[in-house]
Amino acid sequence: MKSQKIERREFLKYGLSIPLFATYLSACKDEFIVPNDTKVMVIGAGISGLAAAKMLSEAGFKVNVIEASDKIGGRTRTNHSLGIDFDEGASWIHGIKKNPITDLAEKAGMLSFETVDESIVSYDLGGKKRSVDLYDSTETRFYEILGTMMKKGNPKKSFGEVFQSNYPEYFKDRLWQFFLSAYATFDTGDLFKLSSLLYDEGEVFGGVEKIATNGYDKIPEYLAKNLDINLNQKVTEIDYSGEKIKVKHNGQESQADFVIVTVPLGVLKNKVISFSPQLPEKKLNAIEKVGVNCVNKFLLTWEKAFWDDVQYITYTPDVPDRFNYFVNVKKYHPDTNALMTFAYADEARATEKQSDAEVISLIMAHLKDIYGSSIPQPKNMLRTKWGSNPNAYGAYSFTAIETEMSHFDDLAASVGQKLFFAGEHTEKDYFSTTHGAYLSGIREAGKILEIFKK
């Protein structure tokens, strides 16, 4: 879902070229014994939950996955209603080199297209096209500042505060506002909630970026094969005080020897699930202190294309964080006349209270300023509302002002060797990404396997 524009360190911690559960099981298949009828319950059928369930099921555990929504995938879901594969959450493989999602996508039959960042045009108010030199030089300077600004950071001050105080002339400039919005807020979160010390934390895989062209949901569908999955099962209580863990969902109770909780951080923050006994203080503190961003996506279609034949169209309105960045879907779906645009942080949350007509009007105001008032209205629009989605309450985690990197480890920590936690928010090196979610599921399944080592 995220744009991955912030340049983080390339760190090939997981330098494997095949799915990690296969690697793990082939390497240690004779090293553990799984007692008969050892039951694992996985809460959440997103990428992390499905990865853990698949690995443990193939190792011989009885695995049951329960999911609150009516379909698998979590925040990796695709809307096919218009005959276009509109990925509501994850869209890109961020760095294909050594990225486990690359091979997983191939095995799942997910097709992808390399999106070229240089295929871009920038417009200011009044439809004034910017020079390539101005755009490129500003982008270069933007990354130079990102690379050093943490030296001016303060544990009690946000990225937005520190940037504004040190670069007031840039903060007021519309092009700079665009970079701060589309290349920072999009990746992380509200700049006035983002840590001024940890804004660039996290690692990346090398290689080009590729966007899914036939639905990112191919991956959860692949992982879910042969798994026992129950949909529309909302978990409300987890009692791990006894020998068996008791899970209440939809008014009924199930029991398991191990439970892996993979619900999004936003769900944990909203206390949708009660735990008995209460979770350790460190984990509760981490749930509170790590931030959750909101990004919403909007797909609009027309009879004919009227826009530039480039991959990305950017616009610098007076109000940042909404509809300033357009992905030209036609570049990878030549027979489709569609644009995809975004809203971030508080502006994203604000769109969730607006009608389709209001949202279309705001988007069209930007496009009309660029291409003229005579351009046609769109035929259709698809949209997301991740902030108010009761099974997500946001898009992905970020390093907020009070976040410490150890909080990601606290979120990942198991409780009593029977209650485990996975999800992108538990993966310190790759938080906020699909590959981070996948790796976290493999990690937690591995912890359970380690218990049964000979």
Image (cartoon, rainbow, N blue to C red):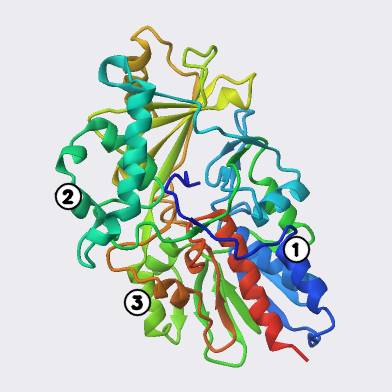
Q: Which residue is mark 2?
A: 166
Q: Residue at x 46, y 18 (%)?
A: 378
Image quarter of residue 406: bottom left
Asked if residue 54 is positioned above or below residue 218 in the image, the reply reads below
Q: Residue at x 43, y 11 (%)?
A: 376
* x and y percentages locating residue 397 in the rendered image: 42, 59
As helix, strand or loop, the secondary structure at mark 1 comes to loop
Q: Label for residue 122?
A: none
Asked if residue 379 is positioned above or below residue 348 in the image, the reply reads above
Q: Residue at x 38, y 82 (%)?
A: 282
**Does residue 355 show up?**
no
Image quarter of residue 417: bottom right
Disc nearer the start of the sequence (3/2)? 2
* x and y percentages locating residue 104 in the rendered image: 71, 53
Q: Residue at x 38, y 67 (%)?
A: 269
Q: Amino acid at mark 1?
A: Leu
Q: In front here: 74 or 91?
A: 91
* x and y percentages locating residue 176 in the rendered image: 27, 36
Q: Label for residue 285?
A: 3
Q: Which residue is mark 1?
A: 227
